[in-house]
Image (cartoon, coloured by chain):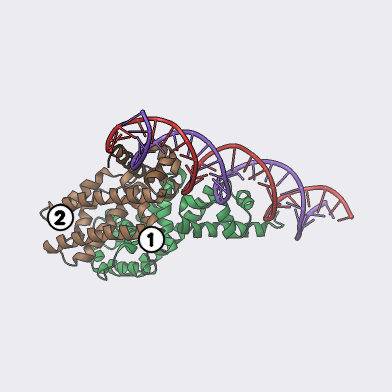
Chain colours: A brown, B green, C purple, D red
Amino acid sequence: MAPTAKQGQEVRQRLLAAAAELIPERGWSAVSTRILAERAGVTPSVVHYHFSSVQDVLTEAAISAMRQVLTTTDELFTSATTPAVAIDALLASIEQYDGTDPMSLLFTETYLAATRDERLHTQIAGLVTDFRTRLADWLTIHQVVEPAATAAVLAATIDGLLLHRTLGPESPALTTVLRRLVS
Amino acid sequence: MAPTAKQGQEVRQRLLAAAAELIPERGWSAVSTRILAERAGVTPSVVHYHFSSVQDVLTEAAISAMRQVLTTTDELFTSATTPAVAIDALLASIEQYDGTDPMSLLFTETYLAATRDERLHTQIAGLVTDFRTRLADWLTIHQVVEPAATAAVLAATIDGLLLHRTLGPESPALTTVLRRLVS
DNA sequence: GATCGTCCTGTACGATCGTCCTGATCGTAG
DNA sequence: CTACGATCAGGACGATCGTACAGGACGATC
């Protein structure tokens, strides 16, 4: 059943990794079969051997990467004792992202691509809705009023801050302001 | 000096309008010379007669459209009497955008394109920084503490909410939560 | 040692890309 | 009436695009 199959899976993973790199670098619609293959160290034909289209590679890579980040962020909240502490940890964790980093751009590129691809949209909506639900549950436990709306605003603000990050000076008082959201 | 020049300017404007339509529809990097020309009702050659490259058309169109929206939002704030009223007006004004509307997508597409084009980045950064400064000034007048950081968070949250808008149910309590930011 | 399944290479197809160049059109000034 | 300048049409260039298909390499199976 699996003679050289193990190597095949490894190449498949390399293609997904290459896609996750290239989406932020070049933009979703500018990732071509050949560029993707070159980055993964294979010939263009291999892309269509493992996937039925380039769109499929991008979709699977984006979903996978986003799911991973969201679960990491989950743990960040669940390990915090109070909402204020969680906000601090949250801001500290997005310190590593400067708005031009791969992960921020991957998220935004995927959001935009989802407006033009129904299947992608469905999957992204599922991911984000689940995250907001878990966040709202946590806020409920910690006595924050309007937990659902607060979760929605928090999630949106994180993405918005990353989107704006390169566009001007960043105030060190962000923490103070964001804490108001969970007061 | 201006024989048929007036018509030339009109065609130029049509090209810019077509670009502002197509950037949200197809994505920044997927707006081609021919698609753009077809939408504007001209032949591809005309694009390079009025502009030196397709990038230039997109850049000028995006900057112009964004500047217009930002000044409109300016007036929305300056005509509000209190921060809470301003938040209400702000949320009411973005009610018209559902996240798949041209203007939301144009903003996000431009942000992303700016990460790959230095000249565009400079211009966008100027626009956003100016907007945040004016917003911060207004917040200062209305006794909101940490006005600069609040303005940054508000601006980011608006874009983030539009980005997330299609991804899940929208809570009607957004106003309540956002008001905390200016309390 | 022949057969088979998996994985990959090489090549080809038509379509589209950005850009440039040449020449037609046409109102206007001399 | 002619010459001019601005505006646009049409075609051409090489490059790249997504995808498909035929065949080779190679370890596992019998």
Mark 1: which amino acid? Glu
Image quadrant holding the C terminus of chain A, namely bottom left
Dot 1: chain letter? A
A21 or A108, nearer to the observer: A21
Does the CB distance between marks 1 and 2 fall below 8 Å?
A: no
Dot 2: chain letter? A
Horizontal side, residue B168 vs residue B75: left or right? left
Q: Determine whether B157 is above or below A15 in the image.
A: below
User: Dot 2: what SS?
Assistant: helix
Instruction: Give the Cα distance between marks 1 and 2.
Output: 37 Å
A38 or B70, nearer to the observer: A38
Image quadrant holding the N terminus of chain A, namely top left
**Residue at 40%, 51% in the rendered image:** A55
Horizontal and vertical percent position of residue B25: 47, 59
Asked whether the residues under marks 1 and 2 belong to the same chain, the reply is yes
**Residue at 18%, 49% in the rendered image:** A89
Of the residues under marks 1 and 2, which one precedes in the sequence? 2
Horizontal and vertical percent position of residue A103: 31, 46
Horizontal and vertical percent position of residue B1: 71, 53
Mark 2: which amino acid? Ala
Quarter of the image for residue A128 reads bottom left
Q: Residue beneath label 1, please?
A: A118
B33 or B145, nearer to the observer: B33
Callout count: 2
Horizontal side, residue B181 vs residue C5: left or right? left
Q: Determine whether D15 is above or below B73 in the image.
A: above
**Residue at 44%, 62% in the rendered image:** B102
Horizontal and vertical percent position of residue A170: 30, 48
Q: Residue beneath label 2, please?
A: A84
Residue B155 visible in the snapshot? yes
Characterize the local packing of mark 2: few (<14), some (14-19) or many (20 or more) Cα atoms within 10 angstroms. some
